[in-house]
Image: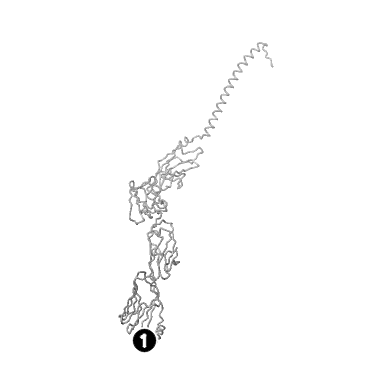
Amino acid sequence: MAMRRFVLISLCCALANTGLGLSVHTVLINGDTEIEWPMSTTRQVSFAVFEKDDVQLLRIDRTNHFKATNGKFYAELKEKSALILKISNASLENNGVYSHTTYYYTGNAEEGMIRLQVQGQPDLFNVSSDTVEGDAIHALCCVESTMEPLMKWKVDTSILNDIKQNASVQKISDYKYCDVVDLTSHRVYNDKSLICEVQNGLHLSVSSSLNVFYEPTVTASVDSVICSKVTCILREFTDALVICTGEGNPRPNVVLESPLRRIDLPEWNSSLIANVSEFTVNRHFWFANITRNHYGLYKCEASNGVGNVVYDAVLLNITFDTTVKMLTSPSDMFTSNGSFIVECESYSNPLAEMSLQKEIYGEWATLRSSTVPESKTRFTAIWKFTFDEIKDGYEGRYRCKAYNGIGRPATSNLTILSPVQQQESRPFTWKLQLMTLVILAVFGLVTVMVMRYRKFVSIYHTRYGTIQARIQGMWGGVVPHF
């Protein structure tokens, strides 16, 4: 009796001196685990008792060689090591506080305690593998655990900053906990995994692959050509490679539309560059010896059955040198008010600078030049040079000259202007012609009237003389006055 009292007193003192704390050990449902209590020495051990929630499970001593089994529980004393408690095929009911009390022949005792937590594998629900961008995803993650877990949501290894990271876990039943996360399907999630991570000692996770169908994107470019916004400048008679790059899920079909007709593989020298990626495709369209007729807006079109058909365009601006001609002939240069007008036309890309030149002492001198035409279409521009006063020495040889920085300057045909041409070249305007006709008509009418008057006077005098002679004969040579 005195010995038992001594042992209990020694045990109380040993527990007070060790100051042992309670740690947590986690095991997976249906898994095996091993709890180990390190010991300073295994010598002089009399026996050890293992308990769960203050209920004895096992006792080991010299009679069983310090090894014992009770169902799924196994305990042993390792020499010069520690006390071991093994649990096989763990279940939720196996959670609790496990302890050991070890007694020494010296009369001292040593105790250790640990909390065992049992956790199941997490599961994901309501996550469809195929979604369309913009769809709402209501993901549910549940786990069986004897302690409330901490849950985090990720897409692959990136934490979703736009959704909750710390789960607001709800307890569904005694050992079941769930968390819900809402997110909108987006192309950045495509071909990635939505992960629910349970941080509860074991740090288990469950994932579901995301296949997000989304509207394609497309870009148009010209290889080895510097483009400004959508305009790419190419010299005539060079080669051009137009590239259409489409990206989407599913991988889009890409075609090129020209200003004149639809371009497809059988008609144009193009090739499909496959395997750029699972979701990206490059389509190459090769134009050899490109000409000004290829000028225009080329549109890359991509479609994959999701959303709208999308476009991107590039303008092929084909540059070429200048041709020029003079539009006015010598007889058309002069106006009714005496001004002198010369019209020049250029055909080029880019727009040329136009000059009007005159030959002076065998050299061509520039009279006027301009970069702003009177009118312009795509490649054709017309300049009008006007001289309000004609000075002496206007006669001579004239030409138009244009240059746009490509090739050599171009000159028009020569036009010779002489004084006779100036005199003959003054046409009447319709007003002057009308006045002339009126004057001629009035003059003719006056002439007719004068001639008729003279005839009348002549007839009058003739008849009056005859009458006067007869009267004189009747009155005896005296003409009465009435």
Of 235 and 147, nearer the camera is 147
Name the residue: 35% across, 47% down: 264
Along the line of sight, which residue is nearer the eye, 132 or 214?
132
Quadrant of the snapshot with the C terminus: top right
Q: Residues within 10 Å of mark 1 (few under 14, many from 20)?
A: some
Which quadrant of the figure has residue 465? Answer: top right
Q: Residue 41 is drawn in which quadrant?
A: bottom left
Question: Which residue in the protein does label 1 denote?
Answer: 107
In the current view of this chain or complex, which residue is farthest to the front?
A: 1
Disc 1 is placed on an element classified as loop
In the image, residue 338 sits, relative to residue 178, either above or below, namely above
Seen in the picture, residue 338 relative to 465 is either above or below; the reply is below
| Residue at horizontal 43 percent and vertical 40 percent from the top | 327
Q: Measuring from the top left, give residue 45's x and y in whole percent.
A: 33, 83
Viewport quadrant of the N terminus: bottom left
Image location (x, y in percent) of residue 259: 40, 46
Residue 307 position, x and y percent, is: 42, 52
Amino acid type at circle 1 is Gly
